[in-house]
Image (spheres, rainbow, N blue to C red):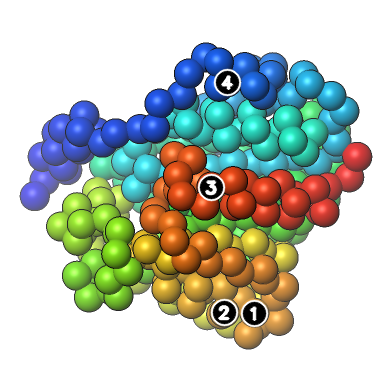
Amino acid sequence: MTREEMIEMARETRKHVTNAPVSEELLAKYPAEIKQVLVPAGETEAVVYDTLTTAGQTSRTIVINFHGGGFIRERTPNDELFCRMLSTRTGCRVLDVDYRVAPDYPFPTALNEAEAVYLWAREHAEELGGTPEDIILAGHSAGGNLAIGVTIRQVRKGAPVAKCLVCDYPPLDLWTDPEDKPKMGKGIPAERARLYNLYYCEREEQRDPLVSPVYATKEDVTGFPPMLMITAGLDDLCTEAEEFALKVARAGGEVTLKRFQNSGHAFTMYRREEYNEAADLIVKYVKQNEIV
């Protein structure tokens, strides 16, 4: 299959993927000022939605959020709602990264943009009302993969890592065929998951730890910051995310791992099943790591 054929198939796929409805009334529950910022990222610019609550006290901590969508879908109103909620409930400034997606822009485009925003935020932290040492990386599904990939890159370079990570049900093993993964009950169909993986990168790249962090070495994860890993018990991606969390823990990292046993993939974004408990956990974790 050519890249052009993949692009056309991805366009059709996007038309048939549903989102949870987000009303203006629901957004209004979490009042925030949102500004679009263009961040230099190599020869192009990354689009970032700078979100800051207008409902109360703010903190000096900056959260950089990477949305999900199988690496092929752009930011949606559900991502805006999550960032508004997080900023309102914690006071943090949230930089929501609308990275370019595959197959139009395959690996490592999204990872490069994610890293560029992280480095830009460190450089401009004071202007953003924060400090370079108080930046949190958060990611949902594919976005969790990017947050981890950015961190592995910093570890390899001996550069400062984020203060902590918050990852929801990330795909962390794109190499193993989806049909061979444990079936938990509500996973993405294997045929679609296989196609998403190929949209993102060539088969020979799928074992790269920056694509599939479960194959990271001990050196790649030694020095990782504290991490909250949320998995969904009915999601076929559950065990690979937990395997990576254990890899970090075995290398001496501080890991908080919570499996929401009765939830499926994307439950925090679509506000399903055990969403309220998971949202409370994320807010609590961010607040315990923030500076007011």
Task: Characterize the local packing of mark 4: few (<14), some (14-19) or many (20 or more) Cα atoms within 10 angstroms.
Answer: some
Judge from the rendering whether residue 42 lies leftward or rightward of residue 56; answer left or right: left
Q: Is residue 243 left or right of residue 199?
A: right
Q: Position of residue 104 (x, y in %)?
A: 27, 37
- Which corner quadrant holds the C terminus? top right
Residue with the mark numbered 4: 27
Give the residue at mark 2: 246
Q: Nearer the viewer, mark 1 or mark 4?
A: 4
Callout in the foreground (2, 4): 4
x then y, percent, for residue 225? 72, 65
Kindly indicate whether the residue at mark 2 contacts the one at mark 1 (C-beta within 8 angstroms): yes
The residue that mark 3 highlights is: 275
Q: Which residue is mark 1?
A: 249
Q: Secondary structure at mark 4?
A: helix
For disc 1, the neighbor class at 10 Å (few under 14, some 14 to 19, many from 20) is: some
Q: Earlier in the sequence, mark 1 or mark 4?
A: 4
Alpha carbon separation for disc pair 2 and 4: 36 Å
Which residue type does callout 4 highlight? Leu
